[in-house]
Amino acid sequence: MKIFKNTSIPKNYKNSILAIGNFDGIHIGHKKVLKEAAKKAKKLKKKFGLLTFEPVPVMFFNKKIINHRIDSEHQKILNLKREKLDFIIIQKFNKKFSNFSYQEFIYKILYKRIKCKYLYVSKNFKFGKKREGNISKLKKYEKKFSFKTIITLPIIKKRRTVSSTIIRKFLKIGELQKANHLLDRKWEIIGKVIKGSQRGRKIGFPTCNILLKKYIIPKFGVYAVNVGINNILKKGIANIGYRPTFNGKKLLLEVNIFGIKKNLYNKKINVIFNKFIRPEKKFKNILELKNQIKKDIKLAKKNV
């Protein structure tokens, strides 16, 4: 699979089948779209590609939105590599690009640069300056610029449309199993281990500390997790929150990896979330906290 950093792609990748979207948190709805588009590409013997945007447009327009992403850009690419794509275009979403009118987007991007033949989009697809472009405007230019718009139908689960928005909601309220089901995989955070206050080590439960950065903030509390370190998978337990027993001020993901005592500072680890165990709680004293952690670890070991 070829990755392009802008829409100026080589001639042999033009006249293709193209899907467009943010694709944050590749889920079963996305996979359905990609499967349909891949099938069309195979039938017509054309290349199949995807146009996506970085940063996520909502984060570009609203700088106050920091914790929004289900997956990092790196994770998004890794997940897309598992699909039957010939190429991905990662278009930098900046001021210049955001000021393209919908007509410019259709003419300059879809027609002149990519020359797509079939365009797969969701029914709510909006594009161009002030989101003035929509499905009806795409269809208006189909004949003139020789492409066909395919509107992909969403997957409905229990009267809810499967979307990245609903997955974010599930993560925020602690419905991890529901989020993982729609993702068709276990949600994970990849981050570099930083040095913390070492309180966990002092009470007998050393932790790897990770900043959430741009990730969506899930429900504060304790989770059963698996941890990937240098392609080796370990079992563990994680806490997301402010550590109220210690009057913590910084939001952290803390991970106690079973059987690992050495420090992993500056190492990148994958924290894979299996089950939400309990909400974060302020304990009366350290002994009460330690006793609860022991109970949490027993539960976690049954769920990893």
Image: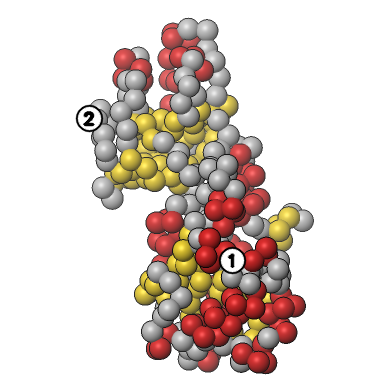
Name the side, left or right, on which 153 lies relative to 188: right
Label 1 residue SS: loop
Q: How many marks?
A: 2
Label 2 residue SS: loop
The image shows residue 239 at horizontal and vertical percentages of 47, 29
Q: Residue at x 55, y 46 (%)?
A: 63
Q: Residue at x 49, y 82 (%)?
A: 114
The image shows residue 213 at horizontal and vertical percentages of 45, 41
Q: How is the image coloured?
A: secondary structure
| Vertical comparison of 11 with 67: above or below | below
Q: Residue 176: tell me if it is visible.
A: no
- Mark pair 2, 1: CA separation: 51 Å
Q: Earlier in the sequence, mark 2 or mark 1?
A: 1
Name the side, left or right, on which 104 lies relative to 223: right
**Kind of residue at badge 2:** Lys
| Vertical comparison of 123 with 25: above or below | below
The image shows residue 229 at horizontal and vertical percentages of 29, 44
**Viewer-closest of 200 and 87:** 87
User: Looking at the image, which residue sits at the far right?
Assistant: 159
Q: Please tell me in which quadrant of the rendered image residue 128 appears.
A: bottom right
The residue beneath circle 2 is 262
User: How busy is the neighbourhood of tag 1: few (under 14 within 10 Å), some, or many (20 plus)?
Assistant: some
- Which label is found at residue 76? none
Location of the C terminus by quadrant is top left
- Which label is found at residue 99? 1
**Kind of residue at badge 1:** Asn
